[in-house]
Amino acid sequence: MVTPSALVFADVTKSFKRKDGKIIALDGVSFSIQTGSVTGLIGPDGAGKSTLMRLAATLLQPDNGQVTVMNLAGDSQAVAVKSAMGYMPQRFGLYEDLSVAENLALYADLQGLPVATRPARYAELTKMTGLAPFMSRLAGKLSGGMKQKLGLACALLRSPQLLLLDEPTVGVDPVSRRELWQIVYQQVAAGMSVLLSTAYLDEAERCDQVILLHQGKVLGQGPPEEFSQALRGRIYRVTSAGYSSRRLQALLSHAPGVVDALVDGDAARLVMATTTLPDAQTLLPADARTSVSILPVEPRFEDAFVARLKVAPAGRQSPLSMGKAAKVPKNSADAVIVVRDLVRRFGDFTAVNRVSFSVQRGEVFGLLGANGAGKSTTFRMLCGLLPASSGQVSVVGQDLRRSAPGARRHIGYMAQKFSLYGDLSVMQNLRFFSSAYGLRGAHQAARIEWAIETFELETYLNANSGSLPQGYKQRLAFAAALMHEPEILFLDEPTSGVDPLARREFWVQTNALAEAGVTVLVTTHFMDEANYCDRLVIMAAGEVLAEGTPEQLKARARTKAQPEPTMEDAFIHLVEGHHEAAA
Amino acid sequence: MSSASRMRLRGIIRKESLQILRDPSSIAIAFIMPVVLLYLFGYGVSLDARNIPVGIVIEQPDTASDALAGAFDQSPFFKPRRFDAIQAARQALDTRDIQGIIWLRSNFSSRLFSGQEAPISVIVNGVDSNQANITRGYIEGAWLAWLGHFAAAQGRPLPLPVVLEQRVWFNAELSSQLFLVPGLIAIVMTLIGSLLTAMVVAREWERGTMEALMATPLHMGEMLAGKLIPYFVLGMGGMLFSVALAVWQFHVPLRGSFWVLLVSSALFMLVALSIGLLISVVAKNQYVAGLVAIITAFLPAFILSGFLFDIHSMPTVVQWLTHLIPARYFVALLQTLFLAGDVWPVVLTNLGALALMLVFFTLVVWRKTGSGLDD
């Protein structure tokens, strides 16, 4: 009997041997995906997404259970499977020192594409991906979005029946992401089946089916609406005249019956445990109840994700206490960070082009943009790690590159990838970072105690930080940056590679810091995280495209067809407008 | 071989060749490294003792002592300096201005002519024991030569029952250049075969391209062959280039057959490549692969192959150890083929050893690569 399934996992278990024992990556996973559909594989970091993808591609063999691809057995017919599917690994699998045409030719050879049909197929694919003008350019010189499309073109060369894409959109700009989805839909319309893994929850809504993976187990499978509809009547948007969205969020996250609360622009978004309409009386203290509005809103996939995975309501019951920083008066007229006409060139490449913005005390200020937009370069110049080619930078009135090292005492810096000492334990890391900031004796002990308590590091104190789960690494790095109670925090891609739940937790802490008067400058490539910022700039190709509050930026993209634009819509709107202006 | 398989193999070979051509470091290792190494070892490093600075202390100059000093003056091995007193000479030895002292006391001539024993004191700086031995040997040679002349001039036979008649074969000039340069070819080929190969395969793991390759119908054998062939060609190119430099630039004689040299090199190249592949399978990032290749392949080839240090003068345990170093057999082959000729027993024994090693490493690589992503 021929089943209509493109891919079937039957009770698949896969484990890996490690020095400190066995890690079970997948545990009794069963599902099947329909021919001619897009299935999204969604789960936090370390859920087993990549292992599942590799098993589907027959790069790995399961310990137990059976993988069937297009009715071919994954073990005994692996070669036939490989001829029938296309696979794009993370980072696209391209040779950066080969040109676009040479990469295509290599994969055409490997997939056995007949030579006679190649010119027509190349023309078709490069037209679809927009790569036609760049055939002789080295793949390493392509932008992230173009690399992604070239990787996709290589996987599509032989029109596979099943296309496997492992996190194809990580760090890629929203315009390219959208284009990738268009190509995927075209392929599906032509009868191809697609399995795609992603850490972006908003992409789930673009799939026909979603498989939710958590800790190696399938938590659910179905159309994305099915997940979100289950939460209908449990999602509310709360605003209060006298309270900032951040204060509201902090209050509401510990209110009875609330599963999750997050800042959503100028409001707080609530996920409730039941469908009963929440009541301001039970949710909020008396002084916050004036002119409160609590409106039911449409559930999103993200709400469903959080509701399913968040077992206990926020582990941290006490709000973050920030010590000294809390005493800094909040004065909105006081610009702590001023950047004017900042330029940075590397050879003939301009990474940052005349960037200007200023950040007020106590603000959460975001630099939003895709990988390669110039965020990190701007950041390094602000922290004094990189000299500017021209323009001015001042942090609390000083250029950190020229000022005395003492000026850095006011600054906390959390670098990309967290820069911890992987071979030191959590405790040793805390001791090192606190003493590096000049903390001694009882004060040091008190701060370490604070960090352990606030970030719940107790259970991992003696574990090497290199072996921590990603979310805990982030907590530890965050704690290290806060040891000396800085007034200004620089956070460079703090949420990259961290799963959605840990990301939310991080933002809760950041909001608490801002509430306490700490100025936070943060970079991110997650468009939805812009909603957590007071103000932000959108960057692309080294330039600032727009500056404003999240609401202002979203309002720019508001049209009749799009009454409720997301930050991603706003971003695309801005980038397209910029291109038109340039043309 | 099916046409699809041929197509895949061709694809990999073309890809590797393009990458070699675009990567300046591969070309540098194959063609610039040999030049640097050959010139460095050919001209810079010398194991020969020539122009050794020695001090001659003559407390009472006369014809006999002048004749002895003259023997040192004329020797190509010494650059003598005259001292009047031992104190000054000792000072020069302390500051390493001279390597040794030949000390003729004031009564040297009178004792010599009166037929008594006329001792010559020889002091050698023993810090570098090798250099000290060579210096002592040459000093002995020089005064033996002088003694011969002296006896002839006196009309007396030399009172020595045994006379040494030396012949140095194969490297009659005792030039270390002739000895070092052929061995360098083994070093260059080890670098290309093991270091370069280990690094390029590790790079594929690092950049995630290996995963993409493995998801295509490409067979492991095709991938290995596709990787090996371009590097084999590169290595042989480096070898031919080094041979050309050795023969025409350094005038090292090639006494054996060129074809035997070619076959030996090809076999060694395959062994070096299989070691490189093995390293890259174990170490999946370039840094570790590079370190492992240098420690397990390059350094042993340098130190334990007999290229620089004579294997017979190593401790027995270390001598056994050298049998595990493929470069040892290749260096023996190179030195024999260049300086002695086609000495078949030597050539066949060493070729046999290399062939055994090739079989061993190929089997290990084959077993190991199967595991792929699983670890």
Image (cartoon, rainbow, N blue to C red):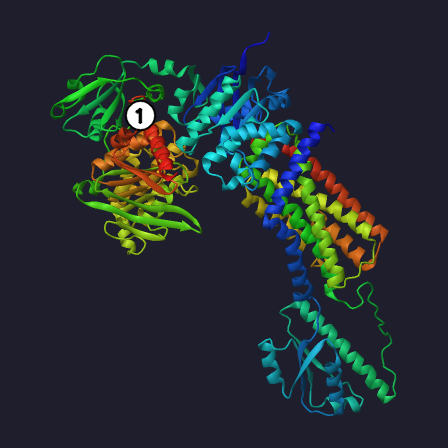
Residue B186 image offset from top left, x and y in percent:
71, 52
Residue B109 picture location, percent across and down:
75, 90
Residue beneath label 1, please? A565
Q: Nearer the viewer, residue A269 or B24?
A: B24
Residue A385: horizontal and vertical position, in percent? Answer: 36, 50
The quarter of the picture where the C terminus of chain A appears is: top left
In the orientation shown, which residue stands out farthest toward the top?
Answer: A1
Answer yes or no: is residue B102 visible: yes
Residue drawn at 42 percent across, 16 percent down: A220
Asked if A231 appears above or below A373 in the picture, the reply is above
Q: Identify the residue at horizontal 40%, vertical 50% (top origin).
A: A345
Place of residue A533 in the rendered image (x, y in percent of width and height, measured from the top left) = 27, 34
Q: Is residue A283 above or below residue A486?
A: above
Label 1: chain? A
- Amino acid beneath label 1: Pro
Q: Residue furthest front?
A: A583
Q: Nearer the viewer, residue A196 or A328?
A: A196
